[in-house]
Image (tube, coloured by chain):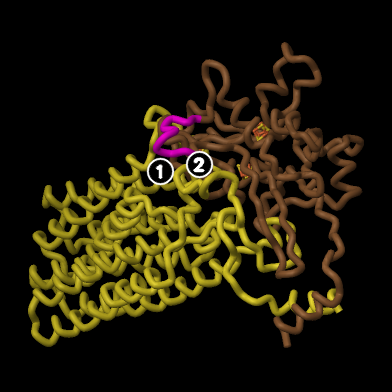
Chain colours: A yellow, B brown
Amino acid sequence: MKPAPQLLVLTLGQGLAGGMTASVGFLASIGGLNHRLALLLLGAALFCAILGGGASFFHMHHFSAARYILRRLKTSWLSREALTTGLFGGTLFLLTVATVWGRLALNSPLYIALAWLVTFFGLVAIFVTAMLYASIPAMLSWHSPVTVLNLLAVGLLGGSGWGGFFGMVEHGPSGQLAAAVAIFLVVTGAVKAFQWHVFSLARHRIRATTGFGLPFAPYRLQDSGTTRAPYRTQTQVHPVISDGLRLRMAVVTAIFLTVLPIVLVILSQIAAEWGWMLGAAISITLGSIFERWLFFADATHSSRVFFADEPREASRVAEPVMRGRLS
Amino acid sequence: MQLTIVTDLNKCVGCKSCQVSCKEHNTSGAYGPVPDAHPRADVDGMWWNRIVTMESGAYPNTSVMYLPKACMHCYDAPCVPVCPTGASYKREDNGVVLIDYDSCIGCQLCMWACPYGVREFDEEEGVVKKCTLCIDRLEDESLPEVERQPACVQSCPTHARTFGDLDDPTSEVARLVSTRQGFGLLPELGARPSVHYLPRRPEPPRVDKETLEKVMAERYE
Ligand code: SF4
Ligand code: SF4
Ligand code: SF4
């Protein structure tokens, strides 16, 4: 489908903000938070949340109806997303104000509880956004729990990467932060690999048999009704990316999102230099952008069955049947 | 009540009368919801009913099929619960799925949720649109009784399309579906489409046995 820039910025901003808030909660819990570090992390998280929230606003195309957005909380994950993302942004803003105000001891139980509460709202917001994608059966690539794991893992990884960098600059507990980044790197790598497998299965679920009631594959699309498929008015069937581009993007994503950061995190610990950790955080952020682009661009929608040929594969079932019929 | 259309795939000849009459009906008059805002830049514009042409099977046993595809007015329409503003809704009295353009925000989530690719985004108005089952004709009491049916049904030259209430077991559509093994598209996705198609009856191959054996030998041995 067509990757909308607004959705890229929304999901990335929301994930990074949630991950950075989690870093604040983690650092406060282990007693490694100082005032400047808290301000840096919360400021960056707020910036990402505002960026994501702003982008989501512009994904609407008919602003005067925006006032109805919470009408279907009972059934619509988009209504719930508007509520939970708003709640996260609001509480993150209040936590930042409380930190700037400076009256709350950063390692006090109250501050730790507040930081984890905001983190909880952040994770709920990411979960709800992920469910919006995962709960649509027609989006064959996304209709899986892996989508939820993926959005959570990439968000936490990005946030912990920047947490690790700010932690090193401000003399926080760099060893523990690096360990947290390393854990998320491994988890994200595994989830991503599994999700690409799910995407590949989805591409092969486009079936003429159920889309047309046709008994025998292969089929060839001669005419989708107009001079070309409705790529302009139906963005969910936007042309699939080529195998080559898919492979190139997957390799680039794997390098930037996991391989390079692992090397840089190890180097940062050996050299005790924050420059390496900055490199890791930037690499993870770039990797997340490539990952998210591929997540949208490579998603297969069931309606593609009416606008493109199914993958060419010899049918092991139909061939003997055809032979039997003809002999 | 569930109003619907049943299409006989044996009778459809792919003339696209229904496709064109849908567009004609829904763009005619002072105001029409199907836009053609940039006819030169985008020759296709928006269509609520598309006739897909498919060639199936392997040579020499091939055939061509035409599939008129518009909103299926699903029983469990997945486009309805995902809509955050309630703009997409299913009418309780007749089962028609409609969109309230005034409360649609244009998020396009319903386009993703619909398995069939029949919802279209209007960039000019920033809202999503689709087949209304010609609800304006069905409920227009100023029209003569015979005209109170969808434009695409009325215009079909081969009478491949039949309109009626699928929930009424005595209706023509219910009879066709039950006696002729009417089927819905993509049943595995759980939308329970009310629009049904009557399957094509297989035709015997029209090539002689010798040619067939020669081709099969070339291909498979
Ligand atoms: S595009 Fe409009 S009708 Fe579709 S889900 Fe969004 S608000 Fe509802
Ligand atoms: S065909 Fe698509 S748009 Fe029509 S009711 Fe079913 S899900 Fe909704
Ligand atoms: S019922 Fe009306 S709106 Fe729907 S496809 Fe037919 S002509 Fe178009």
Mark 2 nearby-residue class (10 Å; few <14, some 14–19, many ≥20): many
Mark 1 nearby-residue class (10 Å; few <14, some 14–19, many ≥20): some
Is B7 in front, or is A277? Answer: B7
Q: Which mark is residue A144?
A: none
Can you tell me which quadrant of the image ligand 2 is in? top right
Depicted B107 relative to depicted B210: above or below? above
Q: Residue at x 55, y 71 (%)?
A: A201
Residue A294 position, x and y percent, is: 38, 64
Is B163 in front, or is A55? Answer: B163
The answer to whether residue B210 is left or right of residue B77 is: right
Residue that numbered label 2 is attached to: A73
> Is the C-beta separation of discs 1 and 2 under 8 Å?
yes
The mark that comes first in sequence, 1 or 2, is 2
Residue A213 in view in this figure: yes
The answer to whether residue A268 is left or right of residue A2 is: left
For the image, the number of numbered tags is 2
For the N terminus of chain A, which image quadrant? bottom left
Q: Residue at x 25, y 48 (%)?
A: A51
Q: Is mark 2 within 8 Å of ligand 1?
A: no
Instruction: State which chain disc 1 sits on.
Output: A
For the C terminus of chain A, which image quadrant? bottom right
Depicted B40 relative to depicted A35: above or below? above
> Label 1 vs label 2: CA separation?
9 Å
Q: Amino acid at mark 2?
A: Leu
Residue that numbered label 1 is attached to: A83
Instruction: State which chain disc 2 sits on.
Output: A
As helix, strand or loop, the secondary structure at mark 1 comes to: helix
The answer to whether residue B162 is left or right of residue A230 is: right
What's drawn in magenta, residue-wise? B35-43
